[in-house]
C-alpha cells in the first residue's frame, strides 16, 4: 500500500520505544501514513522511569522542521514534548513559515514515572502563544490541571477545565480521563459548540506507557487523511484502547502498548 498522507512529528525521543517519537512513528505508520520527525530532546529511559534528558538546540529543531517541510510538505503536524521557552519559540516561528492548519498539541509535562519534563516559564508560553495556534490540544488530567489551575476529580471538572482552555484560546480540547478511577475511561471532547464524551473499557494493566503520545499521533493521522476532528478523536481512542488490550507485557515497570494490532502481515513475509 502507499501512504495515505504525510505527518510531521515534533517531539522527544524515548529510548525504550514505548512513548515519544518512537511511539509516534509506529502509530502513524501502522495507520497507513508517512511519518517525518523533528526531535526536540533525547531521553534515556525504560519502563521504570527516566534516567536522563538531553535537549536538542532550538535552532536545530527549527532546521529539522523547515528543511523537512520544504521538501515534503506535511498534511498535519503532531507536537509533543517541548521542554523550554526557547524550544517553544522556535517551533512557533517555524509553524508560521510552513503554514499547516491541522496541528495537534499533546502538552507533555510529566513522564509516567513522575519526572517533570517542562519548566514553568515554558508552560506559561505554551498557554499564551501555542495553544491558540493549534487545531486540537489533548491534555491528560494532570496536564489539564496545570494548564487551568483547577483540580479535576470528576467528569464535570473535566468539562469545566476544557472550557477554561477554550477561554484561554484553544480551538478544540480533548481531555483524557485515564487518571480518574471510574469503571470506564471517559475522554471528553469540547469545542466552542460541542461536547462529546467517549467511553472506553478500562483494562486492569500497568502497561499504558505512551498512550498519550500514541493517541495524539493517531488523531493527527486521521485528521491528515481528511476526517473531521471529532471523528478523528473517536478513531484515535479506539486505536489506543485496542493497543492497551493487546499490550505485549514488556519491561518491569509501565510497559508499552501494542502499536501493531492494526497490521496484517502478508503471507510472503511470514
Image (spheres, grey):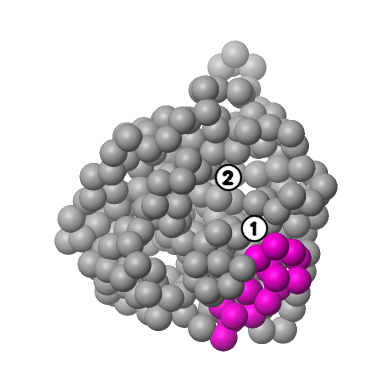
> Callout 1: 10 Å neighbours few (<14), some, many (20+)?
many
On the image, which quarter does residue 118 sit in? Answer: bottom left
- Left or right, 69 with respect to 245, comes to left
Q: Residue at x 32, y 35 (%)?
A: 51
Q: Quadrant of the N terminus?
A: top right
SS class, disc 2: helix
What number is the disc on residue 24? none
Q: State the residue in front, 150 or 209.
A: 150
Decide: few, some or many residues near mark 2? Use Cα within 10 Å; few <14, some 14-19, many ≥20.
many
Q: What's drawn in magenta, residue-wise? A: 152-167
The part of the image, by quadrant, that contains residue 141 is bottom right
The verdict on residue 261 being magenta is: no
Identify the main secondary structure in magenta: helix
- Residue 27, how many percent across, how many down? 54, 43
The structure residue drawn at horizontal position 61% and vertical position 24%, both measured from the top left corner, is 248
How far is disc 1 from disc 2 in space, using C-alphas? 10 Å
Instruction: Tell me the tag on residue 211.
Output: 2
| Residue 157 is a magenta residue | yes
**Placement of 113 over or under 236, stated as above or below:** above
The answer to whether mark 1 and mark 2 are in CB contact below 8 A is: yes
- Find residue 176 and name its label: 1
Residue 264 visible in the shown view: yes
Residue 115: image x %, image y %?
Answer: 40, 46
Dot 1 or dot 2, earlier in sequence: 1
Residue 134, horizontal then vertical, whole percent: 48, 73
Image quadrant where one finds the C terminus? top right
Q: Quadrant of residue 59?
A: bottom left
Residue located 38% across and 69% down the image? 123
Q: In this image, 101 relative to 247: left or right? A: left
Amino acid at each position: 500500500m502507499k501512504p495515505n498522507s504525510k505527518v510531521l512529528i515534533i517531539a522527544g525521543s524515548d529510548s525504550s520505544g514505548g512513548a515519544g517519537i518512537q511511539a509516534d512513528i509506529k502509530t502513524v505508520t501502522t495507520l497507513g501514513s508517512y511519518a517525518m520527525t523533528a526531535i526536540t530532546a533525547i531521553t534515556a529511559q525504560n519502563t521504570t522511569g527516566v534516567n536522563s534528558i538531553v535537549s536538542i538546540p532550538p535552532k536545530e529543531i527549527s532546521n529539522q522542521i523547515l528543511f523537512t517541510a520544504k521538501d515534503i510538505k506535511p498534511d498535519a503536524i503532531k507536537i509533543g514534548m517541548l521542554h523550554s521557552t526557547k524550544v517553544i519559540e522556535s517551533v512557533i516561528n517555524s509553524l508560521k513559515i510552513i503554514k499547516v492548519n491541522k496541528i495537534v498539541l499533546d502538552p507533555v509535562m510529566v513522564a509516567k514515572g513522575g519526572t517533570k519534563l517542562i519548566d514553568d516559564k515554558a508552560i506559561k508560553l505554551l498557554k499564551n502563544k501555542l495553544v491558540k495556534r493549534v487545531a486540537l490540544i489533548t491534555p491528560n488530567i494532570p496536564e489539564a490541571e496545570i494548564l487551568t489551575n483547577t483540580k479535576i476529580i470528576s467528569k464535570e471538572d473535566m468539562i469545566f477545565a476544557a472550557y477554561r482552555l477554550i477561554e484561554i484560546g484553544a480551538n478544540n480540547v480533548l481531555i483524557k480521563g485515564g487518571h480518574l478511577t471510574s469503571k470506564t475511561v471517559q475522554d471528553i471532547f469540547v469545542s466552542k459548540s460541542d461536547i462529546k464524551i467517549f467511553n472506553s473499557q478500562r483494562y486492569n494493566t500497568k502497561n499504558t506507557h505512551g498512550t498519550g503520545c500514541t493517541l495524539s499521533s493517531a488523531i493527527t493521522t486521521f485528521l491528515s487523511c481528511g476526517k473531521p476532528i471529532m471523528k478523528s478523536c473517536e478513531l484515535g481512542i479506539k486505536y489506543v484502547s485496542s493497543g492497551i488490550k493487546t499490550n505485549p507485557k514488556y519491561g518491569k515497570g509501565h510497559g508499552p502498548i501494542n502499536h501493531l494490532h492494526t497490521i496484517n502481515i502478508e503471507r510472503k513475509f511470514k
